[in-house]
Image (cartoon, grey):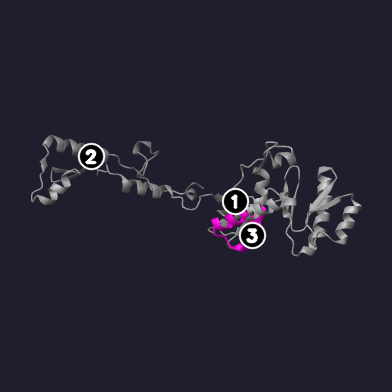
């Protein structure tokens, strides 16, 4: 059942097991919203459905001074505000389910999330304000929004963990809680829908490439790629091979070599020796030893 405020266009979605529960849900909703806003409901407009046009519904409206209006039979455009809202909720929920390849039994979570988001992003054209701002009196905060159906990782703080057990469990993001500051998540390991605030989200959209894939693709497409110079030393001679010389070396029987002078060879050996000159010493220097180092080892019991 979809309920819409005619002024602010704030919407509520109530999920019913059967249409017989419409009266109980509506009566509780009226009492709750009147106490929250400290205002009285003046009119209610609906179609001629049996769940609205019945004796308990009429008695409730008469008791609380509510005028119950009906649209003409087979004329849904007379109640176009709710009909359009119902259509937008259905279309947006269908798109969210198929975009993320989720099962159809998550339709209630998708509709609930759709209503939650629309109440905070839709703007009334004439008033140039969002629905949330008209109903709550302040601007909405949407910095905590995440992509519906994205992969998330839930902190496992309910089960006793051993030292090397995983601290997080993989899940699917389904929406936002209405009664607490928490997210509604489907835990893929426990197969339950739960609410938690200790979550990490992976908001990567389908089809996005990782940075590693982008680097690989960029290296394959680059035409100016050249290998670095490769040098090798063997028996006092060095051989330099560059990228342009590779095809010629493959066809020519002799590979050209450049002989290094003795001075260059000695300099290179000095550099290598200077690099390896550092030696790690496991013991203290002898000049810092107190006493005679030749004396036998003594323990604490020797001084007792």
Can you tell which mark lies on residue 304? none
Q: Badge 2: how crowded within 10 Å, few (<14), some, or many (20+)?
A: few
Spatial separation of the CA atoms under disc 2 and disc 1: 55 Å
The mark that comes first in sequence, 1 or 3, is 3
> Which residue is under mark 3?
107
**In the image, residue 120 lies at what x, y percent?**
67, 44
Given residues 252 and 300, the one toward you in this image is 252
Q: Secondary structure at mark 2?
A: helix
Quadrant position of residue 75: bottom right
Q: Marks 1 and 3, Cα distance to the nearest angstrom?
A: 22 Å
The residue drawn where x is 64% and y is 56% is 90
Q: Is residue 183 visible?
A: no
Q: Nearer the viewer, residue 98 or 61?
A: 61
Q: Which residues are magenta?
A: 91-112
Q: Give whichever of 299, 36 is nearer the camera.
A: 36
Residue depicted at x 35% and y 36%: 287
Dot label at residue 199: 1
Q: Quadrant of the N terminus?
A: bottom right
Residue 273 is marked as 2
**Which mark sits nearer the N-terminus, 2 or 1?**
1
Q: Are marks 2 and 3 in contact (CB under 8 Å)?
A: no
Between circles 1 and 3, the one closer to the viewer is 3
């Amino acid at each position: 059942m979809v309920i819409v405020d005619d002024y602010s266009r704030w919407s509520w979605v109530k999920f019913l097991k059967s249409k017989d529960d419409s009266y109980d849900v509506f009566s509780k909703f009226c009492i709750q919203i009147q106490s929250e806003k400290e205002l009285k409901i003046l009119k209610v407009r609906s179609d001629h459905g049996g769940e609205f046009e019945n004796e308990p519904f009429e008695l409730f409206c008469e008791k609380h001074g509510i005028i119950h209006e009906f649209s003409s039979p087979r004329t849904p455009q007379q109640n176009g505000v709710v009909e359009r809202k119902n259509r937008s909720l259905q279309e947006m929920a269908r798109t969210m389910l198929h975009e993320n390849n989720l099962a159809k039994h998550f339709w209630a979570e998708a509709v609930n999330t759709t209503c939650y988001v629309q109440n905070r992003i839709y703007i009334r054209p004439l008033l140039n304000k969002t629905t949330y701002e008209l109903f709550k009196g302040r601007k909405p905060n949407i910095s905590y929004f995440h992509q519906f159906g994205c992969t998330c990782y839930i902190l496992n703080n309910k089960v006793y963990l051993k030292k090397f057990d995983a601290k997080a469990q993989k899940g699917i993001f389904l929406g936002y809680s209405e009664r607490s500051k928490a997210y509604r998540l489907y835990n893929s390991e426990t197969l339950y829908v739960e609410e938690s605030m200790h979550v990490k989200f992976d908001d990567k959209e389908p089809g996005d490439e990782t940075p590693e894939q982008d680097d690989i693709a960029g290296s394959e497409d680059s035409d100016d790629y050249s290998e670095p110079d490769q040098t090798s030393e063997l028996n006092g001679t060095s051989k330099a091979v560059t990228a342009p010389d590779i095809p010629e070396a493959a066809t020519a029987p002799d590979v050209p070599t450049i002989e290094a002078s003795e001075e260059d060879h000695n300099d290179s050996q000095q550099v290598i020796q200077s690099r390896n000159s550092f030696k790690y010493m496991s013991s203290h220097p002898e000049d810092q030893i107190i006493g005679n180092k030749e004396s036998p080892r003594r323990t604490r019991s020797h001084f007792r």
